[in-house]
């Protein structure tokens, strides 16, 4: 009887066990998340605006940066606004369709971002190691095809993960010890091991690891060329464009690997809530600062935008 009622409840509502049950802490959490969300939103939208308006930024590198900023706006909007609303209204529920939507779009955007970061490393490799062939290898059509391929891979991965996650019968109490519908937490509610989802997750991790290896190989070649540059200014410029990319990739992938490879503890811990922040909240917030807004060309574009007003 409990199992039947619980499955019926699962079809209606999930309960998100947030950061705290204390009203003061909930308000503090909502204020902090709101500040982080606005920072990420304004930073990424500013980058998109500058790249669209300044024709000097209509290059492959900034084309991919514009796509990355759009992805980051969407990625942080999947989880944070709902968490803010729940804290402000002192509730911890999310509908079944809302949970399905979070899982689908989270995998869509996260997978697309990993693919796009890989493409961006290839762009830097061609620009530094094969500068004479850069325009031919990174034509507009080639860039569009790479971006579309990134989105297609994200869509396919999202469909597989969502279908496998919610196809398994769930008979445990519908409590998710997270501030959003995270797949490891959802799998822990299943009546039995979800072999299909485990296989898909393993395949995704292998592909992500492959992307990480490809990025590392690209930067090994880049560094070998950069270290041979006679100009100190040239080496500095190359490092300034490559190191932020590595920071973003390392932060994004390492936290994701840890979250999905680490077995969930029997009793919830603060670490369960902390780790997902590093792949759902931190990259969209930090990317504008470590990737674009410190860039000389972006600063000039921003100054001209201010002067035009």
Image (cartoon, grey):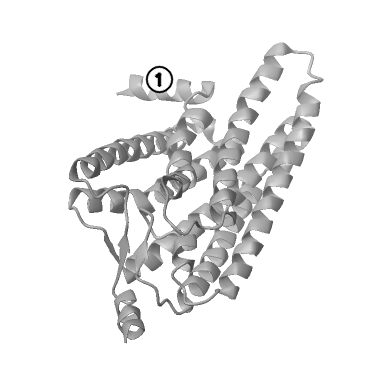
Visible residue check, residue 130: no
- Taking the spot 49% from the left edge, 46% from the top edge, the residue there is 279
In which quadrant of the rendered view does residue 139 lie? top right
Q: How many marks?
A: 1
Q: Secondary structure at mark 1?
A: helix
- Quadrant of the drawing holding the C terminus: top left
The residue sitting at the front extreme is: 267
Query: Residue at label 1?
Result: 303
Residue 124 percent location from the top left of the image: 68, 35
Residue 122, picture quadrant: top right
Q: In screen coordinates, is 150 left or right of 66?
A: right
Q: Residue shown at 62%/54% (left/top)?
A: 145
- Name which residue lies at 21% across and 41% down: 27
Frontmost residue, 263 versus 133: 263
- What percent of the width, then of the height, locates residue 102? 40, 61
Q: Label 1 crowding class (10 Å Cα cut-off): few <14, some 14-19, many 20+?
A: few
């Amino acid at each position: 009887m409990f199992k039947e009622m619980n499955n019926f409840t699962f079809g209606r509502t999930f309960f998100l066990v947030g950061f705290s049950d204390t009203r003061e802490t909930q308000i503090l959490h909502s204020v902090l998340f709101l500040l982080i969300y606005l920072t990420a939103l304004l930073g990424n939208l500013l980058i998109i605006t500058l790249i669209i308006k300044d024709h000097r930024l209509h290059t492959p590198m900034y084309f991919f940066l514009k796509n990355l900023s759009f992805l980051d706006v969407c990625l942080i909007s999947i989880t944070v606004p709902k968490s803010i609303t729940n804290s402000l209204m002192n509730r911890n529920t999310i509908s079944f369709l809302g949970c399905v939507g979070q899982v689908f779009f989270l995998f869509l955007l996260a997978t697309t971002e990993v693919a796009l970061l890989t493409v961006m490393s290839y762009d830097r490799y061609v620009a530094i190691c094969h500068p004479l062939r850069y325009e031919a290898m990174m034509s507009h059509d080639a860039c569009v095809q790479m971006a579309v391929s990134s989105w297609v891979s994200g869509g396919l991965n999202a469909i597989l993960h969502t279908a496998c996650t919610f196809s398994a019968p769930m008979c445990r109490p519908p409590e998710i010890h997270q501030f959003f519908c995270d797949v490891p937490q959802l799998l822990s509610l299943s009546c039995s091991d979800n072999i299909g989802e485990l296989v898909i997750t393993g395949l995704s991790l292998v592909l992500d690891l492959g992307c990480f290896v490809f990025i590392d190989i690209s930067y090994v070649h880049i560094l070998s060329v950069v270290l041979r540059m006679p100009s100190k200014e040239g080496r500095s410029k190359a490092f300034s464009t490559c190191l932020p990319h590595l920071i973003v990739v390392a932060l994004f992938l390492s936290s994701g690997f840890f979250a999905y490879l680490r077995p969930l503890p029997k009793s919830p811990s603060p670490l369960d809530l902390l780790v997902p922040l590093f792949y759902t909240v931190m990259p969209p917030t930090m990317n504008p600062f470590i990737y674009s807004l410190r860039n000389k060309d972006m600063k000039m574009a921003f100054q001209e935008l201010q002067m035009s007003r």
